[in-house]
Image (cartoon, rainbow, N blue to C red):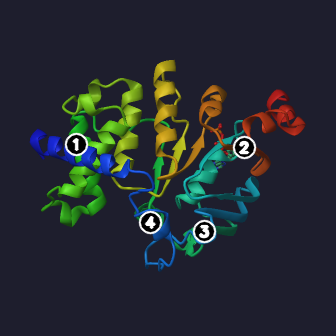
């Protein structure tokens, strides 16, 4: 795609945003359109108000219980923070959701109808669950634009990528994503020349090109400057609502700036849940953090 097309995409996006700015209008056709909508095969069924649902999940490694009767659910559009001491099971929880680790027992559902334990890792990714690991893994030799374009192609599959051409809806999404991840002014920059924070945003952008319903983010602000951390908080707050986010983070300042509900994991189970102030005042939470 050429910069011309990108500009056209940006213009279409601005037009669309102006149209949606009218009171009562939303991209889905307004509130009334939500009624009498039929479930479509392949869509996540959110009728029960949960995009992710785990119940009674157990995982042992050589007899050691890393996840212990864990139950947890996340609402559509929610931004959930997961905190907990080292070894609490936070990464293992993400590994279970993405199909990297199989639990010994328990239930893991995406929406009301998709049993994630029946799907493998690539299958789960294609259902709309994107994961960002701690270390950025962008293609350093490619430009910001090429990285995002590649993410679109990869999403389409190897065979179709041979004949891949970006259509206007995709160019709109690319322009919108560049704006969302604060990299609209760096389209032609080599990804390897970006700062650590910008690389993290680019990788989040690559996930967004695949239009995930649920995003899992593992320590997204580790190694970022204070300014990058603040801009990442802004980015996540913009993403919530349209996407559901599960953020594992040790940086409590960052958690405070984005959190609605915070879940505290300890020894593979939920120890406490509530606002950050509520969990920080919880004696059991204080004990596990200060007891180390
Ligand atoms: N593949 C594995 N084999 C053996 N033990 C494992 C394996 N993966 C995780 N564990 C153990 O399970 C427990 C939970 O680990 P996990 O990485 O999920 O914790 P965490 O909360 O993400 O910790 P951290 O904050 O340090 O990243 C730890 O005691 C860890 O050593």
Mark 1–mark 2 contact, CB under 8 Å? Answer: no
Residue at x 18% of width, y 56% of height: 168
Q: Which residue is mark 1?
A: 10
Q: CA distance from mark 3 to mark 1?
A: 37 Å
Q: Secondary structure at mark 3?
A: strand
- Is label 1 within 8 A of ligand 1 (CB to nearest ligand atom)? no
Mark 3–mark 1 contact, CB under 8 Å? Answer: no
* Along the viewing direction, whichever of 182 and 88 lies nearer the viewer: 182
Residue at x 37% of width, y 40% of height: 203
Please report whichever mark, 1 or 4, sits nearer to the chain's N-terminal start: 1
User: Does residue 225 appear in the picture of this structure?
Assistant: no
Q: CA distance from mark 1 to mark 4?
A: 28 Å
Q: Which residue is mark 2?
A: 88
Q: Are there few (<14), some (14-19), or many (20+) residues within 10 Å of tag 4? A: some
Q: Residue 149, image x and y in percent? A: 23, 48
Q: CA distance from mark 2 to mark 3?
A: 22 Å
Please report whichever mark, 1 or 2, sits nearer to the chain's N-terminal start: 1
Please report whichever mark, 3 or 4, sits nearer to the chain's N-terminal start: 3
Q: Which residue is mark 4?
A: 127
Q: Secondary structure at mark 1?
A: helix
Please report whichever mark, 2 or 3, sits nearer to the chain's N-terminal start: 2
In the image: residue 283, left or right of residue 12:
right
| Nearer the camera: disc 1 or disc 4 | 1
- Is label 4 within 8 A of ligand 1 (CB to nearest ligand atom)? no
Please report whichever mark, 3 or 1, sits nearer to the chain's N-terminal start: 1
Relative to 207, say whether 118 is above or below.
below
Q: CA distance from mark 4 to mark 2?
A: 27 Å
Q: Which mark is residue 109?
A: 3
| Nearer the camera: disc 1 or disc 2 | 1
Task: Determine the residue located farthest toward the front in the rendered image.
Answer: 23
Relative to 186, say whether 98 is above or below.
below
């Amino acid at each position: 795609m050429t910069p011309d097309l990108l500009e056209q995409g940006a213009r279409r996006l601005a037009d669309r945003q102006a149209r949606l700015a009218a009171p009562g209008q939303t991209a889905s056709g307004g509130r009334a359109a939500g009624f009498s909508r039929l479930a479509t095969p392949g869509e996540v069924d959110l009728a029960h108000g949960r995009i992710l649902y785990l119940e009674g999940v157990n995982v042992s490694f050589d007899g050691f219980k890393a996840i212990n009767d864990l139950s947890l659910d996340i609402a559509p559009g929610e931004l959930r923070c997961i905190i907990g001491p080292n070894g609490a099971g936070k990464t293992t929880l993400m590994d279970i959701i993405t199909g990297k680790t199989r639990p010994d027992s328990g239930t893991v559902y995406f929406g009301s109808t998709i049993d994630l334990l029946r799907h493998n890792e690539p299958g789960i990714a294609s259902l709309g669950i994107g994961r960002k690991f701690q270390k950025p893994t962008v293609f350093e030799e490619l430009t910001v634009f090429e990285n995002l374009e590649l993410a679109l192609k990869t999403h389409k599959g190897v065979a179709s990528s041979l004949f891949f051409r970006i259509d206007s809806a995709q160019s709109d999404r690319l322009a919108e994503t560049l704006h969302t991840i604060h990299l609209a002014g760096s389209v032609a920059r080599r990804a390897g020349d970006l700062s650590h924070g910008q690389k993290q945003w680019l990788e989040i952008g690559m996930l967004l090109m695949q239009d995930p319903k649920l995003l899992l983010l593992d320590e997204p602000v580790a190694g970022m400057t204070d300014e990058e951390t603040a801009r990442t908080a802004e980015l996540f707050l913009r993403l919530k609502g349209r996407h559901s986010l599960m953020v594992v983070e040790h940086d409590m300042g960052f958690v405070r700036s984005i959190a609605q509900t915070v879940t505290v994991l300890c020894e593979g189970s939920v120890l406490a849940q509530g606002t950050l102030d509520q969990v920080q005042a919880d004696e059991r939470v204080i004990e596990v953090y200060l007891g180390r």
